[in-house]
Image (spheres, helix red, strand yellow):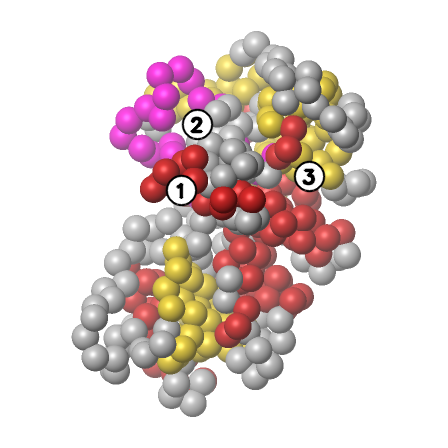
């Protein structure tokens, strides 16, 4: 089969590789579509190999069950679904509590194995996955469904974790209206009653944010925090979701979240928010505000995201590429030229 593989740090190639066989407890998925995420760019630019042999990328996977391995019950060939990306142990206290994304088997790193980030992923014609990672989608289009596996999952999880602050009359700030952020805006509008303020450096992404339901759009500059404070009576937003995570957006999050508010770190830009234990006030983190690094989501978050999509309440904006153009799609994403989500189709 064909697969888009990371062969050396920074090098992507389409290669012919053996079609995997599903082992015990596994399914073989014929891939219908696979989304490209900014975390894929992070892996692409690591200065070392993720593993010794070439790695097939892709953790946003939608497709059809082509074969069922031994010891698998309740799944049949021909079923359509997406792949839940946290391949957790399934029996530790966290998994038993529904927190598969912080499975104890992953130790302090708390990142269970994820396709395309260790095990081979879905930027290929076929991929073998744990049977318990398969979530049905019915007759949903694969290109529309694939981004739900991360862009919707991760956004939904971060938003669900701040629900206490998302009450009528509250304000939520979404920083970054890219692949995740534009879906996050839709989820906020679908499941909460809050006012949504979108922040981005790109006018086109602010236009996309408005299309997705943002009430206000702000161009990111030195005065953005002051404008958010002015729009919230000087207090700050009840929730700030940073889908970028660089120094500037981390600083903006701290300066614009309100007392008892929720600041959620989602983007992987390694930004330093500069939080100290000093007295609250001025530009620092206000009293009562919480900070949470939010990774992925639970399987229930994915199921709920799929339900919202099937009801027509959320929809990732996608740009489709054939698998052979995967390297070009990565280039466009890095240049900020993808509106919404790039999706590869084998």
Where is the N terminus found, in terms of image quarters?
Answer: top right
Q: Is residue 271 above or below residue 78?
A: below
Is residue 184 in the magenta section?
A: no
Residue positioned most to the left: 278
The one of 233 and 205 positioned closer to us in this rendering: 233
- Could you say which quadrant of the image residue 47 lies in? top left
Per the image, the residue denoted by label 1 is 110
Q: Which residues are magenta?
A: 38-62
Per the image, the residue denoted by label 3 is 135
Q: Is residue 158 above or below residue 37?
A: below
Where is the C terminus found, in terms of image quarters?
Answer: top right
At a point 43% along the width and 90% down the height, the residue shown is: 233
At a point 63% along the width and 49% down the height, the residue shown is: 300
Q: Which mark is residue 118?
A: 2
* SS at circle 2: loop
Circle 1 or circle 3, nearest the eye: 1
* SS at circle 3: strand
Instruction: Answer whether residue 338 is visible to the viewer in this image.
Output: no
Q: Residues within 10 Å of mark 1 (few under 14, many from 20)?
A: some
At a point 62% along the width and 71% down the height, the residue shown is: 192
Residue 242: image x %, image y %? 42, 61
Marks 1/3: CA–CA distance: 22 Å
Marks 1/2: CA–CA distance: 14 Å
Marks 2/3: CA–CA distance: 21 Å
The one of 109 and 139 positioned closer to us in this rendering: 109
- Could you say which quadrant of the image residue 129 lies in? top right
Circle 1 or circle 2, nearest the eye: 1
């Amino acid at each position: 089969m064909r697969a888009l593989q990371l062969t050396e740090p920074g090098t992507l190639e389409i290669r012919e590789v053996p079609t995997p066989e599903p082992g015990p407890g596994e399914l073989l998925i014929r891939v219908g579509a696979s989304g490209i995420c900014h975390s894929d760019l992070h892996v692409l630019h690591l200065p070392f190999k993720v593993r010794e042999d070439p790695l097939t990328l892709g953790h946003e996977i939608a497709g059809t069950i082509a074969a069922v391995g031994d010891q698998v019950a309740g799944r049949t060939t021909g079923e359509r679904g997406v792949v839940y990306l946290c391949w957790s142990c399934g029996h530790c206290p966290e998994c038993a509590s529904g927190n598969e994304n912080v499975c104890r088997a992953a130790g302090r790193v708390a990142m269970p194995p994820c396709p395309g980030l260790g095990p081979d992923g879905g930027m290929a014609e076929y991929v073998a996955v744990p049977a318990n990672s398969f979530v049905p989608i019915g007759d949903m289009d694969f290109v529309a469904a694939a981004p739900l596996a991360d862009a919707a999952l991760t956004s939904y999880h971060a938003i669900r974790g701040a629900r206490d602050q998302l009450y009528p009359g509250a304000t939520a700030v979404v920083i970054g209206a890219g692949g995740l952020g534009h879906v996050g805006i839709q989820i906020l509008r679908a499941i909460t009653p809050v006012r949504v303020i979108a922040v981005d450096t790109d006018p086109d992404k602010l236009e996309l944010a408005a299309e997705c339901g943002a009430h206000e759009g702000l161009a990111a500059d030195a005065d953005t925090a002051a404008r958010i404070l002015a729009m919230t009576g000087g207090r700050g937003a009840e929730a700030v979701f940073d889908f970028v995570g660089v120094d500037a957006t981390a600083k903006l999050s701290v300066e614009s979240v309100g007392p008892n508010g929720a600041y959620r770190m989602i983007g992987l830009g390694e930004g330093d928010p500069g939080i100290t234990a000093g007295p609250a006030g001025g530009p620092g983190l206000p009293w009562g505000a919480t900070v949470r690094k939010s990774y992925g989501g639970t399987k229930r978050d994915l199921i709920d995201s799929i339900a919202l999509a099937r009801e027509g309440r959320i929809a990732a904006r996608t740009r489709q590429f054939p698998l052979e153009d995967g390297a070009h799609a990565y280039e466009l994403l890095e240049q900020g030229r993808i509106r919404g989500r790039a999706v590869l189709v084998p």
